[in-house]
Image (cartoon, rainbow, N blue to C red):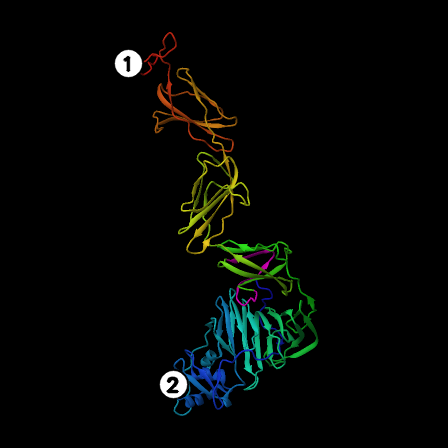
Amino acid sequence: MRAMRWRGAGAAALLIAALACLLASPSWARGPDGFTTHRVEEGQSLPSIAAIYLRSPKQWPLLQKLNRIQDPNKIAAGTMLQIPARLLKPGAINARVEFVRGSPTVISVSTAADAATTRREPTKGAPAVPAPASATAEPLAIGNTLVEGAKIKVPEDGYLLLRLADGSIVRILAGSDVELKRLRRRGAASDSFESIIDVRGGKVESEVSKQPKGRVFEIHAPGAVASVRGTHFDVAVGPDGRTGTSVSEGTVAVQGRKPVRGTSRNTSGNASSGGTTITAGQGVLVEGNGKLGTRRTLASAPDLTGLPAEYQDAAQIVFDLGDSEASTRHEVRIARDSTFREVLRDGVFPGRAVKFAALDDGDYVLGVRSVDTDGLAGAEANRSIRVHARPVPPLYQSPAPDGRITSEAAQLVCSEVAGTEVHLQVSSRADFSQPEIDQPRLSRCQLGLATLPLGDYYWRVASVQTPGPGHGPFAAPQRFSLIATPKVGTLDVADAGDTPTLSWSAVAGYSFHGQIAKDEAFQQIVLETDLNAPRWTINGIARGAYYVRLRAHDASGAEGPYSPPRLLRIGSVVRTSTGGGVVSGDGEPLARP
């Protein structure tokens, strides 16, 4: 939710006036002998052009006759028209769109004029002019010029920056409804301008150039009258008609304003009694009925020194304003540079957690303002940040985080990103200041650890793409432990006829898994079991020749390899007087009946 994003008509109007001089040229060119020239744009008609330039738009047939236009509604783009100076408004000028985010729209005065035109017979010899059904909103783009009467809407995900003829900057924030009420030269040959912006809802920030007297800059909004001369301030209008003004630079005189019956809420009104002057770092709230609030000191700039300088998440960008009060709202924006001409992300967040959609890799400037309970935004703190998230790092596959792996079979495995190589590091230190293994260009993300000493380690991986983005960020390190391989010692068999007993040496605390099969490949397993001690008495297996093998597990569950298969006979054999076994002609032991 944006700070002070109030909407709706109030009972009064905010008038913010700034005095300035000409810093930019008008949209039209002055021709010879008291004429102005206009280059026709795609889709323009004589009625729409007349609505822009003429004191009386109904005089468009004079332009048709003067310029010998056959069809007033079909004029080739690029056609140069002459407009007599005697017919002009007092010096119409324009505002230029310098940055757009999202999908702001405009209903221009020319579109509205076309929509309002009714079918009628014009002056003698001119064809009838059809009337479009209604005015339609058009999308705005960088480079568009906006004229007096343009009605602008900026959606919740949008942002718009305009530059006026004197060089002043107007930022129209998300969720705003604004009309360029007046954009004109004060006198046909004057270098003094008059600009009036009507804020119906949302928030507008203005940077008014410090200039000499003669330049008039006004913002109309419910609730107050404010006069400025060379300043940086913002005005927010809420749904209940309240108007908040915050000053970052310069001085603003604010006075309550009451409406006059039967007049437009934003073009007329009587000043209520009392007023106040607010300077940099101060703000004031005016109720919808014109009641002026108490001047207050705005919140100080938050401390951003604890924020990281680099962000490596390709999915989102997250900030934790940890030193702020949990109940404090924050107005946050990210721009390409410190001028904040191109704001790529902005929003108001309750509390300390801030989250935006990801940005392209590059350098940016972060701006954060604390917002009080009435929606007045305080001083802004700025911090340079860098986004370095691409190419994205590989995904870890094994071992699992904090996994314990045996030295003989240990492998680090990750899934590399298509079209990249992998930079893999292993270090016993979490900061990787002295990595034990540093492989900068692996074509496959798989690395054995047979030569690495036992111990605790960290590993991390990054993608490398050349040509292209180059070296991407490392994934967050993962910890693992390299442990000794649990093994089964020498296997002894105590021959007890049909129930032989197996025993072996092993490390204290190990558990075991045993298998008995008819074949050496252990494809025909007849018995397997888990054992908690290095001893196994076998019962219930028919007499015959079998193979046995064992595997050890340590206390953490890490397992070693199976021991080599060993031949095992179930059932007593005939023995000689010396204790040796009697064998048959084919060399096999002779079983006792």
Inspect the image, locate mark 1, and give the three-letter code of the amino acid beneath it. Answer: Gly
* Residue 202, magenta (yes or no): no
Q: Position of residue 122 (x, y in %)?
A: 42, 89
Magenta extent? 338-357
Q: Residues within 10 Å of mark 2 (few under 14, many from 20)?
A: some
> Would you name the residue on which mark 1 appears?
585
Residue 428 versus residue 223 in the image, above or below? above
The location of residue 37, given as percent across then percent down, is: 46, 85
Let me know if residue 250 appears in the view.
Answer: yes
Magenta residues, dominant SS class: strand
Which quadrant of the structure image shows residue 340? Answer: bottom right
As rendered, which of 194 and 23 lies closer to the eye?
23
Percent across and percent down for residue 201 are 57, 70
Question: Circle 1 — which element?
Answer: loop
Nearer to the camera, 119 or 72: 72
- Quick one: label 2 or label 1, which is nearer the N terminus? 2
Q: Judge left or right: residue 173 versus residue 122.
A: right
* Residue sitting nearer the eye, 174 or 436: 436
Amino acid at pointer 2: Asp
Q: Quadrant of the N terminus?
A: bottom right
Mark 2 → mark 1, Cα distance in angstroms: 120 Å
In the image, residue 353 lies in the stretch drawn in magenta: yes
The quarter holding residue 338 reads bottom right
Farthest-out residue, bottom: 124
Q: State the residue position of label 2.
A: 71
